[in-house]
Amino acid sequence: MQQMNEISVKDKKFSVSISEKEIENSVKNLANRINEDYKGKEITFLGILNGSFMFASDLMKNIKNECKISFIKVSSYEGTSTTGTVKQLLGLNEDLEGKDVIIIEDIVDTGLTMKNILEILKPKKPKSVKIATLIFKPESFKEDFKVDYIGFSIPNDFIVGYGLDYDGLGRNLKEIYTLVK
Ligand code: 5GP
Protein backbone atom coordinates (compact mmCIF):
# COMPACT_ATOMS: atom_id res chain seq x y z
CA MET A 1 0.00 0.00 0.00
CA GLN A 2 1.27 3.47 -0.84
CA GLN A 3 2.00 5.68 2.16
CA MET A 4 0.25 9.05 2.39
CA ASN A 5 3.50 10.95 2.06
CA GLU A 6 4.79 8.81 -0.78
CA ILE A 7 4.21 9.61 -4.45
CA SER A 8 5.21 8.26 -7.82
CA VAL A 9 6.78 10.46 -10.46
CA LYS A 10 7.13 8.62 -13.75
CA ASP A 11 8.76 5.30 -12.77
CA LYS A 12 10.17 6.26 -9.36
CA LYS A 13 8.88 6.58 -5.80
CA PHE A 14 9.52 9.66 -3.71
CA SER A 15 8.64 10.57 -0.13
CA VAL A 16 8.10 14.02 1.41
CA SER A 17 11.25 15.45 2.93
CA ILE A 18 10.48 19.18 3.19
CA SER A 19 6.90 20.29 3.83
CA GLU A 20 5.12 23.22 2.20
CA LYS A 21 5.19 25.09 5.52
CA GLU A 22 8.94 24.53 6.00
CA ILE A 23 9.59 25.85 2.48
CA GLU A 24 7.37 28.88 3.10
CA ASN A 25 9.17 29.71 6.36
CA SER A 26 12.59 29.27 4.83
CA VAL A 27 11.78 31.45 1.81
CA LYS A 28 10.45 34.18 4.11
CA ASN A 29 13.61 34.00 6.25
CA LEU A 30 15.81 34.32 3.19
CA ALA A 31 13.78 37.29 1.94
CA ASN A 32 14.06 38.97 5.36
CA ARG A 33 17.83 38.53 5.33
CA ILE A 34 18.00 40.01 1.82
CA ASN A 35 15.77 42.92 2.88
CA GLU A 36 18.19 43.64 5.75
CA ASP A 37 21.36 43.24 3.69
CA TYR A 38 20.18 45.40 0.77
CA LYS A 39 18.45 48.23 2.65
CA GLY A 40 17.92 51.22 0.35
CA LYS A 41 19.36 49.42 -2.69
CA GLU A 42 17.69 48.32 -5.88
CA ILE A 43 18.11 44.57 -6.43
CA THR A 44 18.35 42.86 -9.80
CA PHE A 45 17.37 39.22 -9.45
CA LEU A 46 18.50 36.72 -12.02
CA GLY A 47 16.50 33.48 -11.99
CA ILE A 48 17.97 30.34 -13.49
CA LEU A 49 15.37 28.46 -15.55
CA ASN A 50 13.64 26.12 -15.37
CA GLY A 51 13.93 24.95 -11.79
CA SER A 52 13.98 28.27 -9.94
CA PHE A 53 10.70 29.72 -11.20
CA MET A 54 8.64 28.84 -8.11
CA PHE A 55 11.32 29.80 -5.60
CA ALA A 56 12.00 33.06 -7.48
CA SER A 57 8.32 33.95 -7.43
CA ASP A 58 7.80 33.25 -3.72
CA LEU A 59 11.08 34.93 -2.75
CA MET A 60 10.35 38.07 -4.74
CA LYS A 61 6.88 38.44 -3.21
CA ASN A 62 8.57 38.88 0.17
CA ILE A 63 11.14 41.46 -0.95
CA LYS A 64 10.55 45.02 0.24
CA ASN A 65 13.24 46.73 -1.85
CA GLU A 66 12.78 48.07 -5.32
CA CYS A 67 13.68 45.09 -7.48
CA LYS A 68 13.72 43.72 -11.00
CA ILE A 69 13.95 40.18 -12.31
CA SER A 70 15.36 38.57 -15.44
CA PHE A 71 15.78 34.93 -16.30
CA ILE A 72 18.53 32.99 -17.98
CA LYS A 73 18.41 29.43 -19.25
CA VAL A 74 21.60 27.49 -19.82
CA SER A 75 22.24 24.08 -21.29
CA SER A 76 23.39 21.24 -19.11
CA TYR A 77 27.14 21.35 -18.69
CA GLU A 78 27.50 17.69 -19.68
CA GLY A 79 29.85 17.37 -22.59
CA THR A 80 31.47 20.75 -22.06
CA SER A 81 34.85 21.07 -20.46
CA THR A 82 34.92 22.23 -16.85
CA THR A 83 36.51 25.50 -17.88
CA GLY A 84 34.22 26.12 -20.85
CA THR A 85 31.09 28.17 -20.52
CA VAL A 86 27.69 26.53 -20.88
CA LYS A 87 25.48 27.43 -23.83
CA GLN A 88 22.89 30.12 -23.13
CA LEU A 89 19.52 28.82 -24.38
CA LEU A 90 17.75 31.96 -23.20
CA GLY A 91 20.33 34.67 -23.08
CA LEU A 92 20.93 37.55 -20.79
CA ASN A 93 19.98 40.85 -22.44
CA GLU A 94 19.63 42.91 -19.28
CA ASP A 95 22.20 45.67 -18.70
CA LEU A 96 23.78 44.63 -15.40
CA GLU A 97 26.55 47.21 -15.25
CA GLY A 98 26.71 48.72 -11.77
CA LYS A 99 23.77 46.61 -10.55
CA ASP A 100 23.47 44.63 -7.33
CA VAL A 101 22.61 41.18 -8.67
CA ILE A 102 21.26 38.20 -6.76
CA ILE A 103 21.24 34.94 -8.69
CA ILE A 104 18.28 32.73 -7.79
CA GLU A 105 18.86 29.00 -8.23
CA ASP A 106 16.80 25.99 -7.18
CA ILE A 107 19.71 23.78 -6.22
CA VAL A 108 23.49 24.00 -6.06
CA ASP A 109 24.90 20.50 -6.30
CA THR A 110 28.54 20.27 -7.55
CA GLY A 111 28.44 24.03 -8.23
CA LEU A 112 29.56 23.71 -11.83
CA THR A 113 26.42 25.27 -13.32
CA MET A 114 26.70 28.23 -10.97
CA LYS A 115 30.40 28.62 -11.70
CA ASN A 116 29.56 28.94 -15.39
CA ILE A 117 26.81 31.46 -14.69
CA LEU A 118 29.23 33.55 -12.63
CA GLU A 119 31.57 33.54 -15.66
CA ILE A 120 28.71 34.73 -17.89
CA LEU A 121 28.04 37.61 -15.48
CA LYS A 122 31.63 38.81 -15.07
CA PRO A 123 31.91 40.76 -18.37
CA LYS A 124 28.55 42.43 -17.64
CA LYS A 125 30.30 44.37 -14.85
CA PRO A 126 27.69 44.15 -12.07
CA LYS A 127 28.49 46.08 -8.88
CA SER A 128 27.94 42.98 -6.76
CA VAL A 129 26.79 39.39 -7.25
CA LYS A 130 25.35 37.16 -4.57
CA ILE A 131 23.76 33.73 -4.80
CA ALA A 132 20.49 32.55 -3.31
CA THR A 133 19.69 28.86 -3.59
CA LEU A 134 16.78 27.04 -2.05
CA ILE A 135 18.75 23.79 -1.77
CA PHE A 136 22.45 23.17 -1.25
CA LYS A 137 24.20 19.79 -1.29
CA PRO A 138 27.40 20.44 0.72
CA GLU A 139 28.72 16.89 0.28
CA SER A 140 28.90 17.18 -3.50
CA PHE A 141 29.90 20.88 -3.75
CA LYS A 142 33.32 21.12 -5.42
CA GLU A 143 33.78 24.82 -6.18
CA ASP A 144 35.18 27.67 -4.11
CA PHE A 145 32.61 30.46 -4.54
CA LYS A 146 30.44 31.47 -1.60
CA VAL A 147 26.76 30.56 -1.58
CA ASP A 148 25.32 33.53 0.29
CA TYR A 149 21.70 32.56 0.93
CA ILE A 150 20.79 28.89 1.47
CA GLY A 151 17.30 27.64 2.23
CA PHE A 152 18.14 24.03 3.08
CA SER A 153 21.35 22.00 3.12
CA ILE A 154 20.54 18.39 2.30
CA PRO A 155 22.41 15.09 1.89
CA ASN A 156 23.40 13.86 -1.53
CA ASP A 157 19.98 12.48 -2.49
CA PHE A 158 17.86 13.16 -5.57
CA ILE A 159 14.86 15.41 -4.93
CA VAL A 160 11.83 16.69 -6.86
CA GLY A 161 9.09 19.23 -6.30
CA TYR A 162 8.70 22.97 -5.83
CA GLY A 163 10.16 23.63 -9.28
CA LEU A 164 12.61 20.73 -9.32
CA ASP A 165 11.94 17.96 -11.82
CA TYR A 166 12.50 14.33 -12.54
CA ASP A 167 12.66 14.06 -16.33
CA GLY A 168 10.56 17.23 -16.65
CA LEU A 169 7.89 16.03 -14.20
CA GLY A 170 7.13 16.90 -10.59
CA ARG A 171 7.82 20.64 -10.75
CA ASN A 172 4.24 21.40 -9.68
CA LEU A 173 4.53 19.67 -6.30
CA LYS A 174 4.17 22.02 -3.32
CA GLU A 175 6.53 20.01 -1.15
CA ILE A 176 10.01 18.65 -1.78
CA TYR A 177 10.29 14.89 -2.13
CA THR A 178 13.32 12.61 -1.88
CA LEU A 179 13.84 9.55 -4.05
CA VAL A 180 13.04 6.35 -2.19
CA LYS A 181 15.95 3.97 -2.77
P1 5GP B 1 25.51 21.42 -10.37
O1 5GP B 1 26.02 22.09 -11.62
O2 5GP B 1 25.55 22.32 -9.16
O3 5GP B 1 26.16 20.11 -10.13
O4 5GP B 1 24.03 21.01 -10.66
C1 5GP B 1 23.02 21.89 -10.66
C2 5GP B 1 21.86 21.35 -11.45
O5 5GP B 1 21.74 19.92 -11.37
C3 5GP B 1 20.58 21.90 -10.91
O6 5GP B 1 20.26 23.15 -11.48
C4 5GP B 1 19.59 20.81 -11.24
O7 5GP B 1 19.13 21.00 -12.54
C5 5GP B 1 20.41 19.54 -11.21
N1 5GP B 1 20.25 18.82 -9.93
C6 5GP B 1 21.21 18.55 -9.02
N2 5GP B 1 20.73 17.85 -7.98
C7 5GP B 1 19.41 17.65 -8.24
C8 5GP B 1 18.35 16.99 -7.52
O8 5GP B 1 18.51 16.42 -6.42
N3 5GP B 1 17.13 17.01 -8.11
C9 5GP B 1 16.89 17.63 -9.29
N4 5GP B 1 15.64 17.60 -9.76
N5 5GP B 1 17.86 18.26 -9.99
C10 5GP B 1 19.11 18.28 -9.47
Image: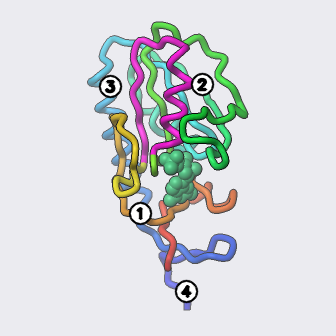
The Cα–Cα distance between marks 3 and 1, rounded to whole angstroms, is 30 Å
Say if 143 sits above or below 39 in the image.
Answer: below
Q: Amino acid at mark 4?
A: Gln
| Residue beneath the point at 48% across and 68% down | 178
Residue 2 is labelled as 4
Residue linked to disc 2: 70
Near-viewer residue (108 or 40)? 108
| Residue at x-position 30% and y-position 16% | 39
- Given this view, does label 2 or label 4 mark the residue nearer the observer? 2
Spatial CA span between label 1 and label 4: 24 Å
| Pointer 2 or 4: first along the chain | 4
Give the label, 1 or 2, closer to the camera.
Answer: 1
Q: Position of residue 127 (x, y in %)?
A: 41, 11
Q: Earlier in the sequence, mark 1 or mark 4?
A: 4
Q: Neighbour class for label 1 at 10 Å: few (<14), some, many (≥20)?
A: few
User: Residue type at mark 2?
Assistant: Ser
